[in-house]
Image: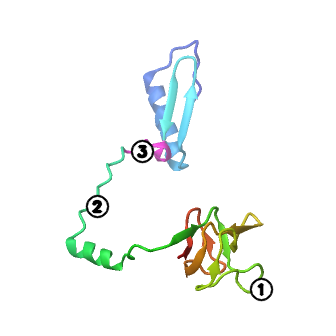
Amino acid sequence: MAFNKDKETRIDDTIECIEALAKIVKDNDLGKIKISTDELDIIIEGKKFAPMPPMAPMAMPAAVPAAQEAAAAESAPATVSGNIVTSPIVGTFYAAPSPDKPPFVKVGDTVNAGDVVCIIESMKLMNEINCEFSGKVAEIYVNNGEPVEFGQKIMRIE
């Protein structure tokens, strides 16, 4: 239905037009349709663009029962002695310079500050990770070929 600005439009014609547009929006699963003339603007919004309801506040978790706290404390490691070598970048941990070579270090090996202890591959670059501490390798937390995150523990030096 076309609107003619020179002649007055009857309200019945406008309502019929709006109902027809609403049916088109619904039948075709449209988000929104807008018709503008000099006389009026008609905007019909379907379900796709309906405003989002306000978010409910997040509920805080209930207090942890004492029995669960005790179990968590038992499973949590005791304070570790020594220094922790962490990953300075995100990438893939490699314990050796190549698959056919021995690892840089193993648990029980002695290292000096500045020694290469592993490689972390990031964006196709092999980054040698030097130990900042001297001592004995007490634990290695990551397996060869595993992904590591920035700041993730790699090994502990005593």
Labelled disc at residue 101: 1
Which of the numbered marks, if any, corresponds to residue 61? Answer: 2
Q: Could you say where residue 50 lies in the image, as x and y percent from the top left?
A: 44, 43
Residue range in magenta is: 46-53
Q: Write the residue at 46% across / 37% down.
A: 19
Q: Looking at the rendering, which quadrant does residue 146 occupy? A: bottom right
Counting residues from the start of the chain, the first of labels 2 and 3 encountered is 3
* Residue at (61% x, 66% y) in the render: 87
Residue 20 seen: no
Three-letter code, disc 1 = Lys
Residue located at (49% from left, 36% from top): 44
Which residue in the protein does label 3 denote? 52
Check if mark 1's residue and mark 3's residue have beta carbons within 8 Å: no
Q: Quadrant of residue 106?
A: bottom right
State how far apart marks 2 and 1 are (Cα): 49 Å
Left or right: where 49 falls relative to 58: right
Disc 2 residue crowd, few under 14, some 14–19, many 20+, Cα 10 Å: few
Task: Tell me: 22 left or right of 143.
Answer: left
User: What element does badge 1 sit on?
Assistant: loop
